Amino acid sequence: MNKPVAAYDKIAFVASTHPEAEAARAELMKRYGNAAPEQADVVVALGGDGQMLQTLHRFRESNKPIYGMNRGSVAFLMNDFSLDRLKERIAAAHRAVIHPLIMEAVDDQGKQHRAPAINEVSLLRQTHQAAKLRLSTDGKVRLAELICDGILVATPAGSTAYNLSAQGPILPLSATLLALTPISPFRPRRWRGALLPDSARIEIAVLEAEKRPVSAVADHFEVRSVVAVRVRMDKSSSMTMLFDPDRNMDERVLAEQFGS
């Protein structure tokens, strides 16, 4: 059920460094004020999908809904921009709840690293040498050897980002799936990835790690020279994104899939 307009009376505005986004923030603040983030009922993010990702990370533990408006270039996750009737639009918006991934990586010194990812966890070769990986899910080896430039695990929210550029599938936000997508696979030559239930626990071992070093990236957090990476969805953590009814995410996913 959507909250009444009064429930969104206090709005915190955040913007990317793009001049258009900063100008929009200034105009919106004149009309609606600007609450301190800790006191706000909702956060309005101004920019593109990158700004939405940063905002979700920033307020990940706050339980505050995020409503994005496009003042950037790539804006699959954003609503159309308008100065008018903002509180009414937010009150009428549809809610989409998303969960982050948790990356647990071990580097070549044995140090363990842990980081959340809202879009994807990716493993990437560090040098001219292709990566050589062993891929397991839920304790079972699925590919004993994958030679590639890398591999990524994408959430539905992140499936339109790096995953899409790597020819991975677009997932509706409501899908209980993860996209496992190789980056420039060489062997097995015909393997193009997999769709996994979001309960899957994914383990990736780096083979010949000294000769073929690999980095692991959880959104913006990078670990160099990893030897093993575990990825799972964290159902105990959630974030809420708000979308205008005419910006229905499922319809946009279908339109993207059919190239319309």
Image (tube, rainbow, N blue to C red):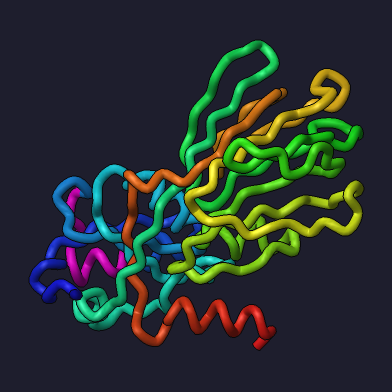
The prevailing secondary structure element of the residues shown in magenta is helix
Q: Residue at x 50, y 58 (%)?
A: 18
Task: Name, please, the residue furthest toward the left.
Answer: 6
Quadrant location of the N terminus in the rendered image: bottom left
> Is 95 drawn above or below residue 121 in the view shown?
below
Residue 253, compared with residue 212, is above or below; it is below
Let me know if residue 71 appears in the view. Answer: no
Residue 64 vs 31, above or below: the answer is above
**Residue at 25% across / 46% down in the picture?**
62
Q: Where, by quadrant of the figure, is residue 25 drawn?
A: bottom left
Q: Quadrant of residue 159?
A: bottom right
How many marks are shown on the rendered structure? Answer: 0
Residue 210 % position (x, y): 83, 18
Viewport quadrant of the C terminus: bottom right
Which residue is rendered at x = 67% and y = 85% of the image? Answer: 258
Q: Residue furthest top?
A: 109
Residue at coordinates 32% horizontally, 47% vertically from top-left? 59
| In front of the other: 136 or 81 | 136
Tell me where residue 195 appears, x and y as whole percent: 63, 60
Q: Position of residue 11 (x, y in %)?
A: 20, 61
The correct choice, above or below, for 92 with respect to 136 in the image is below
**Residue 30 belongs to magenta span:** yes
Which span of residues is magenta-colored? 26-36
**In the image: residue 159, left or right of residue 206:** left
Left-right relation of 245 to 127? left
Question: Where is residue 40 shown, x and y percent of the image?
Answer: 17, 55
- Asked whether 250 falls inside the magenta stretch, the response is no
Determine whether, in the image, residue 5 is placed left or right of residue 238: left
Q: Is residue 172 something that shows in the picture?
A: yes
